[in-house]
Amino acid sequence: MHEGRYCAYADAALTLLRARPSTLAAQAAQLEAAREALETAIGNTDILLNMLKSVGL
């Protein structure tokens, strides 16, 4: 149903983690963005699991 969105979050996080910024500050900002993207993906997965449980699946 929303698999594409979850993959997009994971892809975005991996892209940020693969980047090689020239400064530690830039790297820290990119890691923070990746962390936020992963938290969102995990939260969305939790919502989906709760929805499936609520309908007995």
Image (cartoon, grey):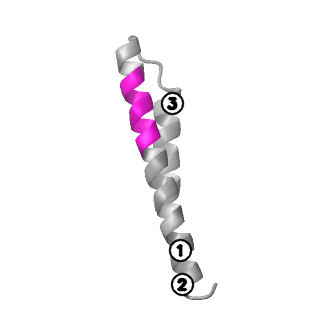
Find the magenta span and give its range.
28-36
The secondary structure that most of the magenta stretch takes on is helix
* Residue for badge 3: 17
* Residue for badge 1: 50
Q: Looking at the image, do the residues carrying marks 2 and 3 touch, with CB atoms under 8 Å apart? A: no
Structural distance between the alpha carbons of marks 1 and 2: 6 Å
Quick check: can you spot residue 2?
Answer: no
Q: Nearer the viewer, mark 2 or mark 3?
A: 2
Residue furthest to the right in view is 57
Residue at horizontal 42%, vertical 17%?
A: 21
Going from the N terminus, do you reach mark 3 or mark 1 first?
3
Q: Secondary structure at mark 1?
A: helix
Residue at horizontal 52%, vertical 47%?
A: 10
Residue 45 point in image, percent of width and height = 53, 63
Residue at horizontal 40%, vertical 29%?
A: 30
Structural distance between the alpha carbons of marks 2 and 3: 35 Å
Q: Quadrant of the C terminus?
A: bottom right
Residue 23 point in image, percent of width and height = 38, 11
Indicate the quadrant where residue 52 lies. Answer: bottom right
Structural distance between the alpha carbons of marks 3 and 1: 30 Å
Going from the N terminus, do you reach mark 2 or mark 3 first?
3
Q: Amino acid at mark 3?
A: Leu
Q: Residues within 10 Å of mark 2 (few under 14, many from 20)?
A: few
* Left/right of residue 10 with respect to residue 21 in the rendered view: right
Q: Which of these two is toward me, 53 or 17?
A: 53
* Residue for badge 2: 54
Q: Looking at the image, do the residues carrying marks 1 and 2 touch, with CB atoms under 8 Å apart? A: yes
Q: Amino acid at mark 2?
A: Ser
Q: Residues within 10 Å of mark 1 (few under 14, many from 20)?
A: few
